Image (tube, helix red, strand yellow):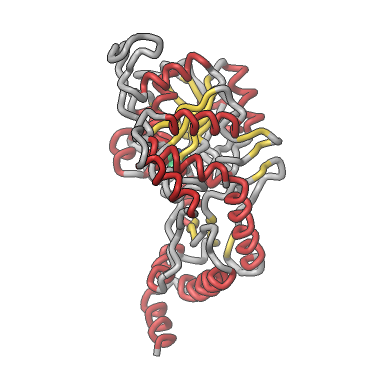
Amino acid sequence: MIPLSRPDITEREKQAVLAVLDSNFLSLGPKLREFEEKMAAYSGTEYAIACNSGTSGLHMIIAGLGIKDGDEVITTPFSFISSSNCMLFERAKPVFIDIDENTYNMDTSQIESKITEKTKAILPVHIFGQPVNMTDIRQISLKYGLHIIEDSCEAIGAEWNGKKAGTMSEAGVFAFYPNKQMTTGEGGIVVTNNKNLAKLCYSLRNQGRGIDTQWLNHVRLGYNYRMNDISCALGIAQLERIDEILAARQRVADAYMERFKEVEGVILPTVDERVKMSWFVFVIRFESWIDRNVVMETLLGRGIGCRPYFTEIHLQPFYREMFGYKEGDFPITERVASGTLAIPFFNSITEEQVDIVVDEVKRAIRYASIADRETRLKKLWEDVI
Ligand SMILES: *Cc1c(COP(=O)(O)O)cnc(C)c1O
């Protein structure tokens, strides 16, 4: 009854989409150019290349930087699987490091110990909208001559030390799936100041077509990663409201922070003082005496949307099989991942709904702290009758 997320679509978005449908240009039209220009202006980069998902954006950067077979990229296992899959598309290898237990971002002090001759890049993920310590990452990248690719898919509008996420490196990506801060239905965008990389991205998203050459002249292997003009129009309308959208999310986050402050067993998000958050999801973590899965099932049974965010990439069946990862490889990531839960978080959530969610979480904790299943079921049953 209270969903996990909900896009924030107004009359303005609907009109913008309808106007495209009344035009002759549903793809590669004027809205694509306009969206890219406005995104470049927003992020303060020279170029913005729209594409059909955040994953395609990450893949184009990996391919565009020439990262290939046998190369290694240092990244985090606590993320959405796409931040590692993007390098597998080019047969490069993700090399994981563990995370910081407070921010859930990659522990930058572990990067140097994983650098080899094969290392080509560092791919930090600004998890849940909190930028990674980019000061550290930039220093390491300069020292060893490594590329940096920012997975900013969850962090549009976030800042590290006053600098925007996605723009503190060679290239960053924002994503626009409906649960993200702003949406285009499906979509993503690469932002960069690197002219050569930008040109390659324009080409790669459009079947490897030559940029300065004639129509249907394909000069490299490319893809269909285009964003259609309907999505672009939706994106333009959302971008015009981005400050309002991010402020609404901040208000909901503040409301949860206030109400959960005194709840025993709940660990709230920690925001570094150098960070300006852009809230993607609101994730609480339970202390080890509480069984997160029982909380989750109890909440779902009561109509409260929730989901584990994230399950570790290295323990996904495909990664275990391909790289031989097992439990215990990244202990902090595993400890965090076993206790975290994303709870309902969207701009139009009401104060009353926030209260309901908090009350239901408190109620669920009462059952989830009973280790013995029999006793737990008995207690649940008693409370029902
Ligand atoms: C959303 C997201 C992406 C991109 O996802 P798409 O579904 O391909 O748009 C990439 N990385 C992270 C960390 C994300 O949260």
User: x, y percentage for residue 172?
Assistant: 52, 30
Left or right of residue 201: residue 281:
right
Determine if residue 82 is in view: no
Q: Residue at x 37, y 42 (%)?
A: 326
Observer-nearest of 265 and 25: 25
User: x, y percentage for residue 235?
Assistant: 47, 41
Q: Residue at x 42, y 17 (%)?
A: 200
In the depicted structure, whether residue 50 falls above or below residue 330: above
Q: Quadrant of ligand 1?
A: top left
Name the quarter where the C terminus is drawn: bottom left
User: x, y percentage for residue 357?
Assistant: 52, 69
Determine if residue 246 is in view: yes
Q: Residue at x 58, y 54 (%)?
A: 249
Which quadrant of the view contains residue 44? Answer: top right
Observer-nearest of 317 and 306: 306
Observer-nearest of 216 and 179: 216
In the depicted structure, whether residue 121 falls above or below residue 175: above
Q: Residue furthest bottom?
A: 385
Q: Residue furthest top?
A: 213
Which quadrant of the view contains residue 108? Answer: top right
In the depicted structure, whether residue 182 falls above or below residue 75: below
Q: Residue at x 62, y 17 (%)?
A: 143
User: x, y percentage for residue 314?
Assistant: 39, 40
Task: Report the number of numbered marks.
Answer: 0
Left or right of residue 262: residue 34:
left
Name the quarter where the N terminus is drawn: bottom left
